Amino acid sequence: MRVKVIAFAGFREILGKERELDVKEAATVKELLQVLAAGSPRFREEAFEESGAVRDYVLLMVNRKRIDPQQDLSRALVDGDELAVFPPLAGG
Amino acid sequence: MIEITDSEICLVELIKRARRDDAGAVVTFLGTVRDDEDCGLEHLEVEAFREAALAELEVIRQEAMSRFALKAAEVVHRTGSLAVGESIVAIVCSAGHREEAFSGCRYIIEQLKRRAPLWKKEISEKGERWVGGA
Protein backbone atom coordinates (compact mmCIF):
# COMPACT_ATOMS: atom_id res chain seq x y z
CA MET A 1 0.00 0.00 0.00
CA ARG A 2 1.06 3.60 -0.47
CA VAL A 3 1.20 6.25 2.25
CA LYS A 4 2.26 9.88 2.26
CA VAL A 5 4.77 11.35 4.72
CA ILE A 6 5.02 15.09 5.28
CA ALA A 7 7.58 16.68 7.58
CA PHE A 8 8.05 20.11 9.10
CA ALA A 9 10.79 22.25 10.62
CA GLY A 10 13.92 20.24 11.56
CA PHE A 11 12.39 17.00 10.29
CA ARG A 12 11.59 18.60 6.92
CA GLU A 13 15.26 19.48 6.56
CA ILE A 14 16.15 15.82 7.12
CA LEU A 15 13.34 14.02 5.28
CA GLY A 16 12.18 16.55 2.69
CA LYS A 17 8.76 18.19 2.72
CA GLU A 18 6.71 15.39 1.26
CA ARG A 19 7.17 11.89 -0.08
CA GLU A 20 5.08 8.85 -0.91
CA LEU A 21 6.21 5.43 0.25
CA ASP A 22 5.18 1.87 -0.52
CA VAL A 23 4.90 -0.08 2.73
CA LYS A 24 3.50 -3.50 3.67
CA GLU A 25 -0.26 -3.84 4.23
CA ALA A 26 -1.41 -2.64 7.67
CA ALA A 27 2.03 -1.26 8.54
CA THR A 28 1.93 0.57 11.86
CA VAL A 29 2.94 4.17 12.51
CA LYS A 30 6.10 2.94 14.26
CA GLU A 31 6.98 0.64 11.35
CA LEU A 32 6.65 3.56 8.96
CA LEU A 33 8.96 5.64 11.19
CA GLN A 34 11.42 2.72 11.14
CA VAL A 35 11.31 2.63 7.32
CA LEU A 36 12.15 6.36 7.33
CA ALA A 37 14.99 5.74 9.82
CA ALA A 38 16.39 2.93 7.68
CA GLY A 39 16.73 5.40 4.82
CA SER A 40 18.19 8.22 6.92
CA PRO A 41 20.72 7.71 9.73
CA ARG A 42 20.18 11.33 10.74
CA PHE A 43 16.43 10.79 11.11
CA ARG A 44 17.13 7.64 13.14
CA GLU A 45 19.37 9.64 15.46
CA GLU A 46 16.93 12.54 15.85
CA ALA A 47 13.72 10.51 16.17
CA PHE A 48 14.73 7.35 18.03
CA GLU A 49 16.34 6.63 21.40
CA GLU A 50 19.24 4.13 21.51
CA SER A 51 16.71 1.63 22.84
CA GLY A 52 14.62 1.93 19.67
CA ALA A 53 11.83 3.89 21.37
CA VAL A 54 10.52 6.96 19.55
CA ARG A 55 11.80 10.12 21.26
CA ASP A 56 9.28 12.06 23.34
CA TYR A 57 9.54 15.27 21.35
CA VAL A 58 8.56 13.67 18.03
CA LEU A 59 5.02 14.84 17.30
CA LEU A 60 2.78 13.03 14.85
CA MET A 61 -0.49 13.51 13.00
CA VAL A 62 -2.34 10.91 10.96
CA ASN A 63 -4.65 12.51 8.42
CA ARG A 64 -4.18 15.85 10.24
CA LYS A 65 -5.27 14.55 13.65
CA ARG A 66 -2.70 14.45 16.45
CA ILE A 67 -1.92 10.96 17.73
CA ASP A 68 -0.51 10.01 21.12
CA PRO A 69 3.10 8.91 20.61
CA GLN A 70 2.91 6.72 23.70
CA GLN A 71 -0.25 4.83 22.73
CA ASP A 72 -0.86 5.11 19.01
CA LEU A 73 2.46 4.01 17.50
CA SER A 74 0.97 0.54 17.03
CA ARG A 75 -1.95 1.96 15.05
CA ALA A 76 -2.23 0.27 11.65
CA LEU A 77 -2.20 2.59 8.66
CA VAL A 78 -4.35 2.12 5.58
CA ASP A 79 -3.69 2.86 1.93
CA GLY A 80 -3.68 6.63 1.29
CA ASP A 81 -3.01 7.69 4.90
CA GLU A 82 -0.94 10.78 5.51
CA LEU A 83 1.58 10.83 8.38
CA ALA A 84 2.93 14.23 9.47
CA VAL A 85 6.16 14.29 11.50
CA PHE A 86 7.29 17.40 13.37
CA PRO A 87 9.11 18.72 16.45
CA PRO A 88 7.49 20.66 19.33
CA LEU A 89 5.36 23.60 18.27
CA ALA A 90 6.78 27.12 18.42
CA GLY A 91 4.26 29.53 16.93
CA GLY A 92 3.43 33.03 18.11
CA MET B 1 -11.30 35.40 10.45
CA ILE B 2 -8.12 33.31 10.44
CA GLU B 3 -5.17 33.96 8.14
CA ILE B 4 -1.70 32.53 7.65
CA THR B 5 0.21 34.79 5.31
CA ASP B 6 3.61 35.69 3.86
CA SER B 7 2.51 39.34 3.74
CA GLU B 8 3.02 42.02 6.38
CA ILE B 9 0.27 42.19 9.02
CA CYS B 10 -1.92 45.30 8.96
CA LEU B 11 -3.23 45.75 12.51
CA VAL B 12 -5.44 48.70 11.56
CA GLU B 13 -7.28 46.51 9.05
CA LEU B 14 -7.86 43.81 11.71
CA ILE B 15 -9.21 46.36 14.18
CA LYS B 16 -11.57 47.63 11.48
CA ARG B 17 -12.83 44.09 10.90
CA ALA B 18 -13.36 43.42 14.64
CA ARG B 19 -15.29 46.61 15.44
CA ARG B 20 -18.98 46.13 16.25
CA ASP B 21 -21.65 48.62 17.28
CA ASP B 22 -22.41 46.53 20.37
CA ALA B 23 -18.73 46.13 21.37
CA GLY B 24 -17.34 48.50 24.00
CA ALA B 25 -13.82 47.05 23.95
CA VAL B 26 -11.32 46.01 21.30
CA VAL B 27 -8.13 44.36 22.62
CA THR B 28 -5.14 43.70 20.39
CA PHE B 29 -2.11 41.46 20.87
CA LEU B 30 0.92 41.73 18.62
CA GLY B 31 3.76 39.20 18.86
CA THR B 32 7.01 40.55 17.41
CA VAL B 33 10.46 39.22 16.51
CA ARG B 34 12.75 39.72 19.51
CA ASP B 35 16.55 39.77 19.55
CA ASP B 36 17.23 38.27 22.99
CA GLU B 37 20.06 40.06 24.82
CA ASP B 38 21.60 41.18 21.55
CA CYS B 39 22.40 37.62 20.46
CA GLY B 40 22.80 38.88 16.92
CA LEU B 41 19.54 37.62 15.46
CA GLU B 42 19.55 38.35 11.74
CA HIS B 43 16.07 37.09 10.91
CA LEU B 44 13.46 34.50 11.74
CA GLU B 45 12.01 31.85 9.42
CA VAL B 46 8.42 30.90 10.27
CA GLU B 47 6.92 27.67 8.93
CA ALA B 48 3.37 26.34 9.14
CA PHE B 49 1.54 23.09 8.50
CA ARG B 50 -0.90 25.40 6.79
CA GLU B 51 -4.06 23.29 6.49
CA ALA B 52 -3.77 21.84 10.01
CA ALA B 53 -2.86 25.23 11.54
CA LEU B 54 -5.83 26.98 9.89
CA ALA B 55 -8.19 24.27 11.17
CA GLU B 56 -6.77 24.37 14.73
CA LEU B 57 -6.81 28.17 14.88
CA GLU B 58 -10.45 28.18 13.79
CA VAL B 59 -11.30 25.74 16.62
CA ILE B 60 -9.43 27.98 19.10
CA ARG B 61 -11.21 31.07 17.75
CA GLN B 62 -14.61 29.42 18.14
CA GLU B 63 -13.75 28.33 21.70
CA ALA B 64 -12.77 31.90 22.61
CA MET B 65 -15.90 33.35 20.96
CA SER B 66 -18.19 31.18 23.07
CA ARG B 67 -16.23 31.15 26.37
CA PHE B 68 -15.80 34.91 26.55
CA ALA B 69 -18.88 36.08 24.61
CA LEU B 70 -16.69 37.83 22.05
CA LYS B 71 -18.33 39.83 19.28
CA ALA B 72 -15.43 39.16 16.90
CA ALA B 73 -11.96 37.59 16.89
CA GLU B 74 -9.35 38.08 14.17
CA VAL B 75 -6.15 36.02 14.07
CA VAL B 76 -3.29 36.45 11.59
CA HIS B 77 0.01 34.52 11.73
CA ARG B 78 2.98 35.26 9.50
CA THR B 79 5.09 32.73 7.66
CA GLY B 80 8.33 33.22 5.74
CA SER B 81 11.30 35.41 6.54
CA LEU B 82 10.85 38.08 9.26
CA ALA B 83 13.25 40.79 10.44
CA VAL B 84 13.79 41.80 14.08
CA GLY B 85 10.86 43.94 15.22
CA GLU B 86 8.41 42.64 12.59
CA SER B 87 5.03 41.26 13.67
CA ILE B 88 4.73 37.44 13.81
CA VAL B 89 1.16 37.21 15.05
CA ALA B 90 -1.75 39.58 15.58
CA ILE B 91 -4.91 38.86 17.55
CA VAL B 92 -7.80 41.30 17.83
CA CYS B 93 -10.84 40.59 20.00
CA SER B 94 -13.92 42.72 20.48
CA ALA B 95 -16.47 42.24 23.27
CA GLY B 96 -19.15 44.11 25.16
CA HIS B 97 -16.67 44.93 27.95
CA ARG B 98 -12.88 45.00 28.37
CA GLU B 99 -12.66 42.00 30.70
CA GLU B 100 -14.03 39.57 28.11
CA ALA B 101 -11.94 41.13 25.33
CA PHE B 102 -8.69 40.82 27.36
CA SER B 103 -9.51 37.24 28.42
CA GLY B 104 -10.41 36.18 24.87
CA CYS B 105 -7.24 37.67 23.43
CA ARG B 106 -5.08 35.98 26.07
CA TYR B 107 -6.85 32.65 25.60
CA ILE B 108 -6.22 32.69 21.85
CA ILE B 109 -2.47 33.45 22.08
CA GLU B 110 -1.90 30.87 24.83
CA GLN B 111 -3.79 28.14 22.95
CA LEU B 112 -2.13 29.09 19.63
CA LYS B 113 1.31 28.59 21.19
CA ARG B 114 0.25 25.25 22.65
CA ARG B 115 -1.76 23.77 19.77
CA ALA B 116 -1.15 25.35 16.35
CA PRO B 117 1.41 23.54 14.13
CA LEU B 118 3.79 26.45 13.53
CA TRP B 119 7.58 26.64 13.95
CA LYS B 120 10.29 29.30 14.11
CA LYS B 121 13.93 29.10 13.10
CA GLU B 122 16.36 31.72 14.37
CA ILE B 123 19.13 32.74 12.01
CA SER B 124 21.83 34.61 13.92
CA GLU B 125 25.55 35.41 13.80
CA LYS B 126 26.08 32.18 15.77
CA GLY B 127 24.24 29.97 13.28
CA GLU B 128 20.73 28.56 12.86
CA ARG B 129 18.44 26.87 15.36
CA TRP B 130 14.82 25.74 15.49
CA VAL B 131 13.11 27.22 18.52
CA GLY B 132 12.27 24.50 21.03
CA GLY B 133 12.73 21.61 18.63
CA ALA B 134 14.90 19.21 16.67
Image (spheres, grey):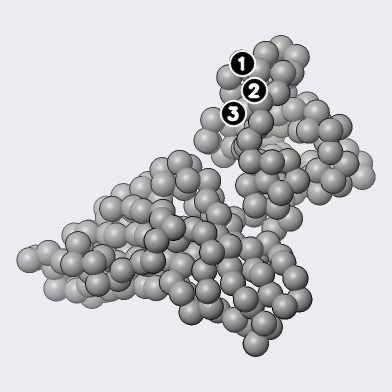
Identify the residue at horizontal 29%, vertical 60% (top origin). B74
- Front residue of this view, candidates B3 and B18: B3
In the depicted view, which residue is nearer to us: B13 or A61? Answer: B13
Residue A59 appears in the picture as rendered: no
Which residue is denoted by mark 3 in the rendering? A82
Return the residue at label 1: A79
Direction from residue A31 to residue B23 in the image, left or right: left
| Residue type, mark 1 in image | Asp
Compute the Cα span from label 1 to label 3: 9 Å
* Residue at left offset 24%, top offset 67%: B13
Q: Which mark is residue A3?
A: 2
Q: Residue furthest right?
A: A50
Please say if the residues under marks 2 and 1 sit with CB atoms less than 8 Å apart.
yes
Q: CA distance from mark 2 to mark 1?
A: 6 Å
Above or below: residue B47 compared with residue B86: above
Please rate how many residues cluster around mark 3, counting C-alpha atoms within 10 Å: few if below 14, some from 14 to 19, many from 20. many
Q: Secondary structure at mark 2?
A: strand
- What secondary structure is marked by label 1? loop
| Rendered view: B81 above or below B61 | below
* Label whose residue precedes the other's in the sequence (2 or 1): 2
